[in-house]
Image (spheres, helix red, strand yellow):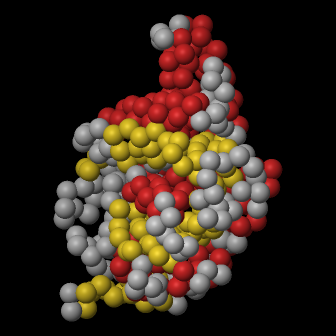
Amino acid sequence: MSLSDVGIEALAVALPRRYLPIEALARLRGVEPAKLTVGLGAREMAVPDPGEDSVALAATAVQRLLATSGLDPARVGLLAVGTESGVDSAKPVASFVQGLVGLPREARVFDVQHACYGGTAALLAASEWIASGAADGRVAIVVAADVARYGARTAGEPTQGAGAVAMLVSERPEVLALDLGVSGAFATDVHDFWRPVGRREPLVDGHYSIQCYLDAVAGASRGWRARAERRGLVTKGAPASAQLARLAYHVPFCKMARKAHLHVRRTELEDRLGRPLDADELAAEDAAGAASFERQVVPSLELPARIGNTYTAALYFGLTSLVRQGGPALGGQRVGLFSYGSGCASEMYSGVVGARASEVVARAGIDDLLAAREPLDGEGYERILALGAGEPLDEAPAPGAFRFRGVVDDKRTYARA
Ligand code: CAA
């Protein structure tokens, strides 16, 4: 049983047209491939050209959501875009999307920016808007869309990517019914990853950012656990995370999900004992944690491994992967989700997968989108990376997609196939 009848009814995604196999990046930079494949858990990295900016990706995903869900756009009362790679300091990505896709003028339209947490903040706000009754029978569209760009020869370069997930949020949560009111938030003022206004690439204190993420997942999972126990979603006394069928974590790179999961388990064990684990307990937990990671978390990494970091969208590509990998058997089961945004804010929450979720997610046509992508070699990747932000490749949009075409009279222009 879920705690609400509100959540994700359907979803659709947008992916850049090209990707770089991670071994090609290793060759290009003279790095041992295992550092990227094993050390970071990377496989492929989406490489957007400037024509595939956050607006184009978000609008493409929403257009596909409307087409595949059959939703009447007139029913949309709220459009929220979570992004940290917006294209204007004032005009939100959501306004571009509203205009490009043709959503009602009476809708509440806004962006949410808080690094990679913005999509989750938007999803929870939209869900609570519906649960409060303020929606008055209308539905919400929440989009998580980002271009994760670090630049050539930086430590973050192998963790780039781009993509968007658009979600229809309603009182028919066929994909995921949220346990509203059962979440744990954790936020602190840190400089782990940030992008001063005007900079195209972020500044990152990479190893510190991993520590900030781990502190956040410990704090947020404690909050979720306390509420889940109080509301009877999990049995007190047994590890709460182990009572979830699956978990998806924010995925800046796949190995981070492993670090996060092991940290959540260890935090739970140490909280219960009231002391740090001793050497024997640590050895036992190493084995148990590795097995539980394979079973509970690896299914969430299918798409993140193929796309790379997508900031706000990474967790929702993780959820999509869980549903795809779990198939009909995951229907009716409770899953946990952890969202982390540098700076930092984070939240762990849970929900119950719908009985028809895998069927609904299959409509997003993700296998076809992946199969249509073009692999780049190192040279092709460098050519795209060198393009200025206002210099899209001169090519037509892919079927059903939008593209940024350039700036005319100081205004960004977009084209649709
Ligand atoms: N074979 C196998 N493994 C190898 C190896 C080899 N030949 N060489 C190195 N490794 C392993 C290392 O042991 C290490 O593993 P552990 O973390 O388990 O110890 C791993 O590969 C990475 O090696 P380094 O730590 O030496 O790598 P690095 O210093 O080049 O940078 C990074 C790693 C800090 C994650 C960097 O990619 C980075 O700055 N990324 C961007 C920031 C980021 O993603 N932070 C995550 C938390 S913040 C967040 O989540 C928000 C967000 O989206 C940005």
Could you tell whether 313 is left or right of 87 in the image?
A: right
In depth, the one of 70 and 36 nearer the eye is 70
Of all residues, the one furthest to the right in this rendering is 329
- Residue displayed at 20% across by 56% down: 196
In depth, the one of 360 and 375 nearer the eye is 360
How many circles with numbers are drawn on the protein?
Answer: 0
Q: Image height check: is 379 above or below 319?
A: below
- Residue displayed at 63% across by 19% down: 237
- Residue displayed at 32% across by 50% down: 154
Could you tell whether 18 is left or right of 391 in the image?
A: right
> Residue 67, percent across and down?
62, 82
> Residue 371, percent across and down?
66, 70
Could you tell whether 131 is left or right of 197 in the image?
A: right
Asked whether residue 143 is in view, the answer is no
Asked whether residue 368 is in view, the answer is yes
> Residue 273, percent across and down?
54, 11
Query: Would you identify the image quadrant in which residue 185 lies?
Result: top left
- Residue displayed at 56% across by 26% down: 265
> Residue 302, percent across and down?
63, 52
Q: Image height check: is 386 above or below 191?
A: below
Q: Image height check: is 92 above or below 413?
A: above
Query: Would you identify the image quadrant in which residue 173 lies?
Result: bottom right
In depth, the one of 170 and 83 nearer the eye is 170
Q: Image height check: is 266 above or below 241?
A: above
